[in-house]
Image: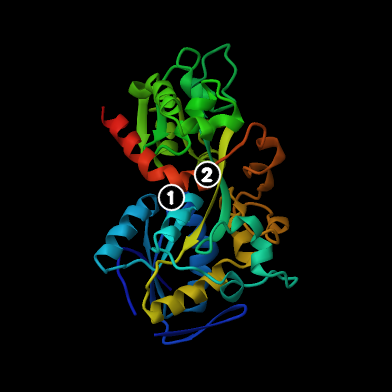
Amino acid sequence: MKLKTAMMGAAGIVALTAGGAVAQDMANEMTIVSWGGAYQASQDNAYFQPYLSDHSDVTIITDESSADAVARLRAMTEANNVTWDLVDVEAADSLRLCDEGLAMPIDHDAVLAAAPDGTSATEDFGPMIVSECFIPQIVFSTTFGYRTDMVPEGVDAPTDACAVFDLETYPGRRALNRRPVGNMEWALLCDGVPYEEVYETLETEEGLERAFAMLDTIKDQTIWWSAAAETPQLLADGEIFMGSTYNGRLFSAIAEQDQPIGMAWGYQMLDIDGWIVPAGLPEDRLARVMAFLNFATDTQRLADQAKYISYGPARASSAPMVGTHETLGIEMAPHMPTDPANMTGAFVTNYLWWADYRDEIDARFQAWLAQ
């Protein structure tokens, strides 16, 4: 079993049949790109190692560049040197990559396994399949963690994202993503824009200025992160009072590491994450990827990932199989972002909107950060 971190490539013949990939001359290496940290560790435990145990001749090379996947794939394609074989991205990025021809369309029912009762993959994943190029894995959320021992005496602990803008009640440094997704929505929601008007407001110059003005109120107290693992570490080190990250990263810090951290679920940003296959892979690399996808996205594997991190599986047939944490023995369902107790005030990210406006607002956001 071989798993290493690097970047590399490889190169035969694939024939797709209902229920999976049958191939000759499969490549013996795959470069799989994901997000690092506790999330990539959960993929390693649920997908990579079980696959490698059955395929001792295969090497999986891991890369943690998913945050820059769109820019990196654009550059690789332009250079005619795509070294990645499978890439984990958020739904909005999958739409951009698909629209630009950088991700290949997938016949989901031909490539992916059916549910145990015979339900097709397309029906089992349902609306999670947001584009013909996207293979869903998880439902996750971006939410806030805070230091429980830094909550001022006599003050209630934070319950939602708006506490990040309240420096008077909750003094201390913050941590926010260097990307606009989530930050722009929170800024408007916490400035009084109704839930249903957030994206309509962001389409206007006045709305953008309003969001940036709200973010200006905490800008000089904020550490801007690029990797989701940074916020849990900043919280563990006591360098911030409150910060955003993915709910699974906070679960790991709280439940597995016993850090003095609490979760503020209100206005959590729900989203979908999954795989895309870069367009134009040589046939032998494509054959290996398709075989791996058939294995790694079946009902059992998606349920298995929930043993290691608190993200909901994207297949309907996987949800009833979510049980206890692999080592802690605690029930995982209450820690999922989709648990009813955590859904009060949840905000569903409009990935279609972000696919249309992401490049424009990214440029605007980075310029604002540089000011």
85 lies above or below 211: below
Q: Which residue shows up at 61% across the image and 54% down it?
A: 306
Dot 1: within a 10 Å radius of its alpha carbon, few (fewer than 14), some, or many (20 or more) residues?
some
Question: Mark 2 vs mark 1: which is more N-terminal?
Answer: 1
Tell me residue 368's x, y (percent).
31, 30
Viewer-closest of 285 and 261: 285
Viewer-closest of 84 and 103: 103
Tell me residue 161's x, y (percent).
53, 28
Task: Name the image colouring.
Answer: rainbow
281 lies above or below 75: below
Give the residue type that dot 2 points to. Ser
Count of all numbered marks drawn on residues in the image: 2
**Local secondary structure at mark 2:** helix
Horizontal arrangement in the rendering, residue 224 relative to residue 337 (left or right): left
Image quadrant of residue 34? bottom left
Q: Which mark is residue 61?
A: none
Say if residue 145 shows up in the picture: no
Q: Which residue shows up at 45% across the image and 38% down it?
A: 232
The residue tagged 1 is: 37
Viewer-closest of 54 and 180: 180
Viewer-closest of 366 and 248: 366
Q: Which residue shows up at 33% across the image and 60% down it?
A: 73
The residue tagged 2 is: 252
Tell me residue 286's x, y (percent).
43, 76
Q: Residue furthest bottom?
A: 24
**Local secondary structure at mark 1:** helix
300 lies above or below 351: below
Tell me residue 220's x, y (percent).
33, 22
Q: Residue furthest left?
A: 79
Say if residue 328 shows up in the picture: yes
Give the residue type that dot 1 points to. Gly
